[in-house]
Image: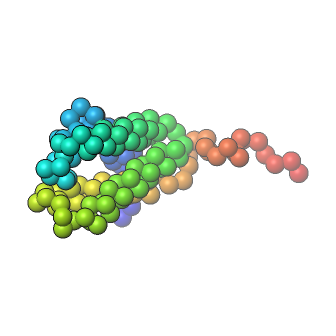
Amino acid sequence: MGMDRDAARALARLVGAGRVAVGVTALVSPVAVTEPWIGSLAGAPGVRVFARAMGGRDIALGIGTLRAVTRPGDEARTWVALGGVADTVDLLATAFSFAKLPRRRWAILVVTAAAAVASFRAATALEGPERGAPRSSPLHNGATPAG
């Protein structure tokens, strides 16, 4: 059974807000975000810089998603799907190094997989323009073709 548009928007808001929260945490306390993922290396200066940079990515994707879900049209689908792509990359990066990661690697794998699935599920349910909403395509301006 498919998800209705309101439920998809609620899920997208949840994922977007979670992304902003993780991003802010990475900026303020990068070790808190990286230690469960990579263990004792989390405190290294280069890792802290990288975590803060990734936090900026999550904040931008999260704010874009939160903004898009409040507007008519299909812009939200794009933002939510792009967040799902980022989560899928995180999932794959974790899976490729899984054996060398600390014990909490399972939690990271589950969280990144859940975020990716939630994002793609919401994006799929948001597919297509809303009834009565303007199309977001630059090619559609409401004019009828000359005949």
Inspect this view and state whether residue 37 appears. Answer: yes
Q: Position of residue 76 (x, y in %)?
A: 47, 45
Where 105 sits versus 44, above or below? below
- Name the outermost residue toward the right: 147
- Name the outermost residue toward the left: 103
- Name the outermost residue toward the top: 28
Picture residue at 29% right of the left edge, 66% below the top: 96
Residue in front for this viewpoint, 138 or 36: 36
Residue 126 as seen in the image, left or right of residue 87: right
Q: Where is residue 126 in the image (x, y as percent from the top left)?
A: 46, 51
Q: Position of residue 107 (x, y in %)?
A: 17, 57
Q: In which quarter of the image is the N terminus?
A: bottom left
Residue in front for this viewpoint, 141 or 80: 80
Where 3 sits versus 51, above or below? below
Q: Would you identify the image quadrant in which residue 58 lies?
A: top left
| Number of numbered callouts drawn | 0
- Name the outermost residue toward the front: 45
Picture residue at 67% right of the left edge, 43% below the top: 138
* Applied colour scheme: rainbow
Where 18 sits versus 94, above or below? above
Q: Position of residue 90 (x, y in %)?
A: 32, 56
Inspect this view and state whether residue 62 appears. Answer: no
Picture residue at 81% right of the left edge, 48% below the top: 145
Picture residue at 19% right of the left edge, 46% below the top: 42
Q: Would you identify the image quadrant in which residue 94 lies?
A: bottom left
